[in-house]
Amino acid sequence: MSSHVLLEIGKKFYLGEEFADVYIVFMVNDEEVERVPAHKNILAANSDVIHTMFNESWKEKNEVKIVDADVADFKEFLRFFYFGMVNLTIENVDAIMNLSNKYNVTECKNLCRKFLKATMTSENMILRYELAIFLEDESLKKFCEVMISIDPQDFLKRPGFLQCNKNTLAALMEMKGLKCSEVELFEACMSWVKNKSEEENLTRDIVQSELGDLFYKIRFGSMTIKEFSTLIPSYGSLFSNGELQDIIQFVGDKEFQSKLFIETREKRCDVNLFEGYKKIKRNRLAPQEQSAKPYIMKNLETTTFSVNETVFLIGFKSAPLWIYNNNIYRRLTEVVPSEITIVRIPNTSDPSFNEEVVLGTGKINLESKHVKFNLSEPIMISPNFIHEIRLMQTPNEHSSTYILLKSQFQIDSDFSVQYHRDTERGIIYRLDFYRI
């Protein structure tokens, strides 16, 4: 009932002239474009920034001029104040995220962040990263960095990287983990300089002009002599004699401390990208663990699931197997080899994703005890798709489990996992995720 009442209030007041006590006036080149009616109490109740403005700089005003926002984007942002919801698109999410940040509307910002994560692609990743840096949004920034780190070779060749601003490049060079060599990162920086300077033949002055102190953030200490020597034919002239001497000593002597370049010797590619991020390990066992009726294992076992926000699958856990015969459970004495395939199921609502995509494979031996399987690399699980873990095996005809499973469970207040198809019985009873 309360939701219905709030919905009706929203319909009555949103963009409505009646009872409006303030107008938001949109200006372009000092000319009025549109006047949007609003209500001070509703705006102030949802934003402490606006609340302060109405008590100070906007106190005596019944109209507020806006010069830094598009009318359509701001109207959509206002929808959140009146309905607690917002219609996000690829085109408007950056603007609404910016407005949410500017006026400190936390819940709207959270929705934008989830949308940005869920719709991130190789093409828009750098723009999302720049937005996160500009807004100082650590959650979105960390997510982008994990996505970049997974396949940096592809990322560093994208036009978006070559066109990114210097602040973004600086953030990239400060990243602890990248699954690429320092030589590859150095060459990517040189490509960035060529694009920015519009000069194909680089000189020391050009590199210093574009990179400045970032040149000294390259981890030459993590290179081998052989790796560094591959740079000399193309880039040797970019270094002074003192810098060359410093790097050679730095690379060759583990006790040497460089006074010119960053002293880190750790290879970025050896860093665990997910270290420090939250692990989610929750089983989906129903309160009544045992069932009088056994579940007989099939040649193809599937666990089909979806999530409500982007996470990274890191593994799963299987239930113990038993032999059920003549109404008696007996412990399975042999292992059941199983082939694992993890797939993204086609999205019927989006014709551009109409093919099944294999995201990972592996092998596991199922047996009479709980078996944990860890993926060699975490797999991104998007809320835009249904995903499926398939186990293919040839079990004993009496192989079975007795557990009952939940079809849905809430992990945190705002994160849940939904299971589909055969939801109450199965072999996999726990999925493990990283949540960033």
Image (cartoon, helix red, strand yellow):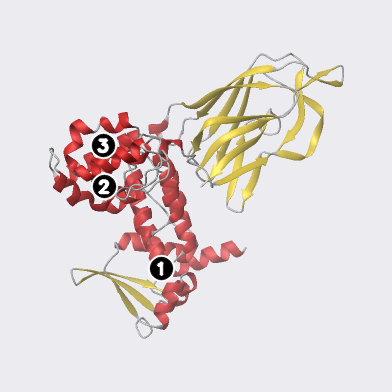
**369 to the left or right of 184:** right
Marks 3 & 1, CB-CB < 8 Å contact: no
Q: In the rendered view, tell whether residue 299 sits above or below residue 160.
A: above
Q: Which residue is mark 3?
A: 187
Check the image and report above or below for 394 versus 143: above
Question: 102 or 434: which is nearer to us?
Answer: 434
In this rendering, would 220 be left or right of 385? left
Q: Tell me which numbered mark, 2 or 1, is placed earlier along the sequence.
A: 1
Quick one: SS at disc 3? helix
Real-space Cα separation, disc 3 to disc 1, in angstroms: 41 Å
Q: CA distance from mark 2 to mark 1?
A: 37 Å
Q: Residue 147 at x, y = what percent?
A: 42, 41
User: Residue at 74% of width from left, 13% of height from top?
Assistant: 397
Q: Amino acid at mark 1?
A: Tyr
| Residue 279 drawn at (x, y percent) | 59, 44
- The residue that appears at 33% across and 45% down in the rendered structure is 126
Q: Is the residue marked by circle 3 packed among few (<14), some (14-19), or many (20+) residues within 10 Å? A: some
Of marks 3 and 1, the one in the foreground: 3
Q: Is residue 48 visible?
A: yes
- Amino acid type of disc 2? Phe
x, y percent for residue 368 = 76, 23
Q: Position of residue 417 (x, y in %)?
A: 60, 42
Q: Which residue is mark 2?
A: 215
- Element type at mark 2: helix
State which tag comes first along the sequence, 3 or 1: 1
**Can you say which quadrant of the picture contains the N terminus?**
bottom right
Label at residue 69: none
Q: Which residue is mark 1?
A: 103
At x 36%, y 81%, the residue is 58
Mark 1: secondary structure: loop
Q: Residue 409: which quarter of the image?
A: top right
